[in-house]
């Protein structure tokens, strides 16, 4: 609590120079902005502004929920959207608050930094005339070594000492202000780290099915969704490739996951392929990117043999529906089925697709819609077959996970039956073609990210914490010793020391520091070799009150 | 083991109740003493000096004003009730700790795997912190009424609303960061929650000292002096704030490893942020002489409400990556 609240203003200057009104206004606004009150208000606003970010679904975290919200609240949602309520942490008003806060912060710490550097460079100030007016006061016999002994005792306790004739001034606890400044500066650096990550970072999510044919190479096109910072060129993504060799998952009897491990072959440019493992909590750290394991599931391998005897295989991942039993839902589409090998002509009305549910552990009896356990104890594939124009050629954007509803509604695609298949079973459709369920492959959901700001963030957080501790627990205080030799004239004429060689000591806590009386007493005892602080109780007590209200007095 | 733990929790709640009732009795009997106090203004002065110094917190303080026979029987009884209350609190805390230990043994891990265990641990830290404070400053004993009230409410809520059977950790929690992050969060939350006790007491006592004699303020008649309460409020917050800061940073480091981003504005993260900013606001306000101490303390109370939101609300109302509360 050194330099707090509004910094001293200098109104006296104003009339002399008849300053420009605008300039005065600017100067005043600046002072307002950098005042502690403004900082408080902004802090409070920041906290309030963050609340909707947790109450309303946020687009960058759960876009599906935002869509749901639009469906549930058709009137309110667009209005909320207009004020950015679904992207609170990127909204104009949220940014405005923290940018103002940080401006205020910088405006606040710059002058304090200057003052503090000056204080660090200057010597502890001269002792006040009346040491007995200080919150702590004591009189003790002059120690044997005289002034040097006092200085020595203080230095041993790491006080900064200045000697002026028969006076010793000492100060300690610069750490408080240093820590406070380090803390606030670190906060600016944290923000810089976040900004750095935002501009130069990138991330993408994708599913990776096991097997060499499903290898993934790190290019923009290979991501289902990718976010690139404004300063990232997609050409500069590091060019590594991953093949999922194995994925292990162990579950408890309750179905709760217990352990995951993904084994991949990594190929980085200029390096020999290598095998690597990663898991939840221990990502795969590559050059320029980290790969995180976010989820997993099953990709049923489905073979369709068309009327010309030609077979095709689909191993698209079935997305998990969110239940503990890992029920998967997906689509196996064969748009290139039933192409007459003689004419090469494709009949788009003979395209085939299967939607289905995959249950790693199907219940004993139907309905086969919900898996009972996440591992494959009783796997079953509940398929529905469709034939017709899947709408994939017409340039209609299609999902690889869902059949186009419009094609079904308009009758272009017809359902031709459903059946539950066990691994290895096959199903003959009405037109003599067959579909076989060969088994499953594992797939994992990956998040690939690069955040160049993370190192800076980590370091600045360390400084932030260290600074905070210094700031909260540091205590600035001063002590003064004055040697009074016999015959010294005392200006006040009522010196308690006249007549003998004594030392008068005074102590001033410059911050809220309840333990100062004790420290002062110990210090006096150490210096005086047993000298007793006088009336420590009385002076000490109202001294505290004085220190409490007059913190920051010089 | 797990059944034993559940029973211990129930007994702990009962013991807190006993402590609360004893504190209330002490209060009531203390009020009966009013006549004597008026008759002996010197006693008031002693009380004011003990608390009013506000600066002697690190020193072993004067014991509670000595009770003399002159003051009559109710005072002796009040004192006994107060001591019974403290004893019951100690017993409750011991039962509480035993419940946590048995729960940990039953689960074969630290008992912080879901919200029930989490709240149980946080509240234990709170009560342990209280006992430390009490050992250092016995004169604050009367705050125990508020503390035990808070404990009964929180622990009973945990048992009635949040209870889940013992299960092992999901892999996402299975990391050494679990211990680092959660232990510090638990510790700091406990102390921050404890901080509301002197904060509320201060607000009431301050009003009382300012001459207010309407309902909530009259309760503060027997409380320690406002300055001492304010000081304690600050010490608790200043002590736990850096720990909380560390815990949040540790959480971010862990989140980077587990989810690939240090900070994602998940509801839990958002509320931790809110709490942190509010408590930073409290520290600022307190360091600013032009902001009155009661305004600053109100900010600390708001901080407490955000902590409650963090502990209970987030897991109940929102779903996010942190939703391991075990409720559905
Ligand atoms: C980004 C927003 C800010 C945060 C999170 C923040 C946080 C904190 C915290 C936690 C403390 C407590 C440390 C202590 O009491 O020693 C503190 C102290 C302080 N802050 Fe800030 N601060 C922020 C912005 C500001 C601004 C804008 C100013 C200037 C107007 C400022 C001036 C101060 C001062 C002077 C202290 C020292 C109080 C004392 O001596 O105890 N801070 N700040």
Image (tube, coloured by chain):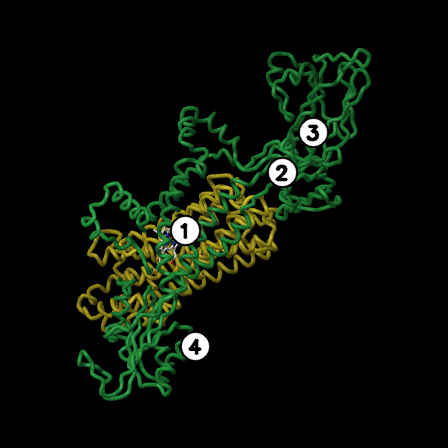
Chain colours: A green, B yellow
**How far apart are the two marked residues, 4 and 2, measured between alpha carbons?**
57 Å
Frontmost residue, A366 versus A58:
A58
Q: Please, which residue is most extreme toward the front here?
A: A17
Q: Are marks 4 and 3 on the same chain?
A: yes
Q: Residues within 10 Å of mark 2 (few under 14, many from 20)?
A: some
Dot 4 or dot 3, earlier in sequence: 4
**How far apart are the two marked residues, 1 and 4, measured between alpha carbons?**
52 Å
Judge whether A511 appears above or below A64 on screen: below
Instruction: Tell me whether the residue at label 2 lies in contact with that at label 1, contact meaning CB atoms closer than 8 angstroms.
Output: no
Dot 3 or dot 2, earlier in sequence: 2
Q: Residues within 10 Å of mark 4 (few under 14, many from 20)?
A: few
**Ligand number 1: quarter of image:** bottom left
Q: Residues within 10 Å of mark 3 (few under 14, many from 20)?
A: many
Residue B153 disc label = 1
Chain at numbered mark 1: B
Instruction: Point out the image quarter for the N terminus of chain B.
Output: bottom right
Chain at numbered mark 3: A
Dot 4 or dot 2, earlier in sequence: 4
Residue A285 disc label = none
Residue A222, position in %: x, y? Answer: 65, 32
Helix, strand or loop status at disc 4: helix
Q: Is residue A326 left or right of residue A100?
A: right
Q: Is residue B169 left or right of residue A138?
A: right
Instruction: Indicate yes or no: mark 4 CB to ligand 1 under 8 Å.
Output: no
Instruction: Indicate yes or no: mark 2 CB to ligand 1 under 8 Å.
Output: no
């Amino acid at each position: 609590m050194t330099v707090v609240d509004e910094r001293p203003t200098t109104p006296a200057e104003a009339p002399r120079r008849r300053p420009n009104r605008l300039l005065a206004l600017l100067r005043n606004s600046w002072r307002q902005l950098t005042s502690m009150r403004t900082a408080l208000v902004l802090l409070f606003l920041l906290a309030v502004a963050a609340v909707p970010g947790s109450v309303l679904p946020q687009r960058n975290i759960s876009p599906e929920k935002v869509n749901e919200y639009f469906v549930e609240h058709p009137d309110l949602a667009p209005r909320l959207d207009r004020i950015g309520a679904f992207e609170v942490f990127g909204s104009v008003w949220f940014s405005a608050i923290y940018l103002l806060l940080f401006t205020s912060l910088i405006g606040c710490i710059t002058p304090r930094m200057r003052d503090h550097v000056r204080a660090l460079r200057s010597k502890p100030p001269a002792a006040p005339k009346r040491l007995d007016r200080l919150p702590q006061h004591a009189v003790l016999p002059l120690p044997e070594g005289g002034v040097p002994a006092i200085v020595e005792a203080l230095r041993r306790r790491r006080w900064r000492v200045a000697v002026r004739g028969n006076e010793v001034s000492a100060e300690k606890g610069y750490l408080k202000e240093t820590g406070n400044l380090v803390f606030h500066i670190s906060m600016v650096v944290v923000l810089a780290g976040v900004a750095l990550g935002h501009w130069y970072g990138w991330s993408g999510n994708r599913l990776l099915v096991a097997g060499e044919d499903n290898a993934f190479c790190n290019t923009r096109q290979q991501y289902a969704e990718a976010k690139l910072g404004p300063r990232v060129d997609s050409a500069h993504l590091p060019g590594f490739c991953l093949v999922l060799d194995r994925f292990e998952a162990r579950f408890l009897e309750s179905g709760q996951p217990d352990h995951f491990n993904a084994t991949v072959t990594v190929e980085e440019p200029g390096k020999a392929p290598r095998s690597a493992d990663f898991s939840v909590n221990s990502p795969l750290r590559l050059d320029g990117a980290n790969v995180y394991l976010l989820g997993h599931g099953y990709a049923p391998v489905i073979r369709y043999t068309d009327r010309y005897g030609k077979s095709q295989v689909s191993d698209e991942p079935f997305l998990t529906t969110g239940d503990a039993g890992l029920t998967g839902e997906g689509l196996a589409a064969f748009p290139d089925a039933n192409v007459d090998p003689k004419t090469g002509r494709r009949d788009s009305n003979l395209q085939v697709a299967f939607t289905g549910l995959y249950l790693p552990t199907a219940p004993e009896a139907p309905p086969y819609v919900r898996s009972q356990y996440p591992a494959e104890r009783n796997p079953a594939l509940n398929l529905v077959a469709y034939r017709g124009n899947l709408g994939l050629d017409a340039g209609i954007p299609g999902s690889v996970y869902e059949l186009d509803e419009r094609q079904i509604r308009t009758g272009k695609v017809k359902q031709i039956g459903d059946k539950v298949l066990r691994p290895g079973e096959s199903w003959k459709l009405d037109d003599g073609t067959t579909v076989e369920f060969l088994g499953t492959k594992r797939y994992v959901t990956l998040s690939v990210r690069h955040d160049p700001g993370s190192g800076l963030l980590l370091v600045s957080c360390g400084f932030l914490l260290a600074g905070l501790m210094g700031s909260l627990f540091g205590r600035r205080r001063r002590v003064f010793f004055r040697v009074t030799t016999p015959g010294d004239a005392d200006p006040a004429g009522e010196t308690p020391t006249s007549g003998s060689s004594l030392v008068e000591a005074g102590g001033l806590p410059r911050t809220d520091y309840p333990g100062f009386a004790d420290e002062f007493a110990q210090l006096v005892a150490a210096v005086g070799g047993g000298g007793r602080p006088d009336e420590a109780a009385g002076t000490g007590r109202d001294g505290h009150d004085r220190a409490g209200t007059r913190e920051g007095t010089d | 083991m797990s059944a034993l733990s559940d029973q211990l929790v129930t007994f702990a709640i009962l013991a807190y109740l006993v402590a609360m009732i004893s504190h209330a009795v002490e209060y009531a009997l203390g009020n009966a003493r009013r006549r004597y106090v008026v008759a002996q203004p010197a006693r008031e002065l002693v009380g004011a000096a003990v608390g009013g110094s506000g600066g002697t917190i690190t020193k072993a303080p004067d014991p509670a004003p000595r009770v003399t026979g002159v003051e009559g029987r109710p005072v002796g009884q009040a004192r006994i009730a107060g001591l019974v209350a403290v004893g019951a609190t100690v017993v409750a805390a011991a039962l509480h700790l035993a419940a946590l230990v048995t729960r940990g043994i039953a689960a074969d891990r630290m008992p912080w795997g879901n919200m029930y265990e989490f709240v149980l641990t946080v509240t234990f830290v709170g009560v342990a912190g209280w006992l430390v404070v009490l050992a250092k400053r016995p004169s604050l004993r009367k705050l125990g009424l508020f503390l035990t009230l808070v404990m009964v409410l929180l622990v009973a809520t945990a048992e009635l609303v949040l209870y889940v059977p013992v299960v092992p950790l999901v892999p996402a929690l299975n990391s050494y960061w679990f211990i680092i992050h959660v232990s510090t969060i638990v510790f700091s939350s406990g102390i921050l929650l404890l901080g509301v006790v002197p904060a509320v007491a201060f607000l009431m006592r301050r009003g009382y000292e300012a001459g207010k004699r309407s309902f909530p303020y009259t309760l503060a008649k027997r409380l320690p002096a406002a300055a001492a309460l304010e000081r304690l409020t600050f010490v608790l917050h200043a002590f736990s704030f850096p720990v909380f800061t560390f815990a949040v940073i540790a959480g971010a480091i862990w989140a980077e490893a587990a989810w690939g981003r240090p900070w994602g504005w998940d509801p839990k993260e958002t509320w931790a942020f809110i709490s942190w900013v509010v408590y930073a606001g409290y520290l600022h306000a307190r360091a600013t002489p032009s902001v009155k101490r009661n305004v600053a303390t109100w900010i600390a109370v708001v901080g407490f409400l955000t902590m409650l939101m963090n502990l209970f609300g987030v897991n109940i109302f929102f779903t996010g990556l942190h939703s391991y509360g075990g409720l559905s």
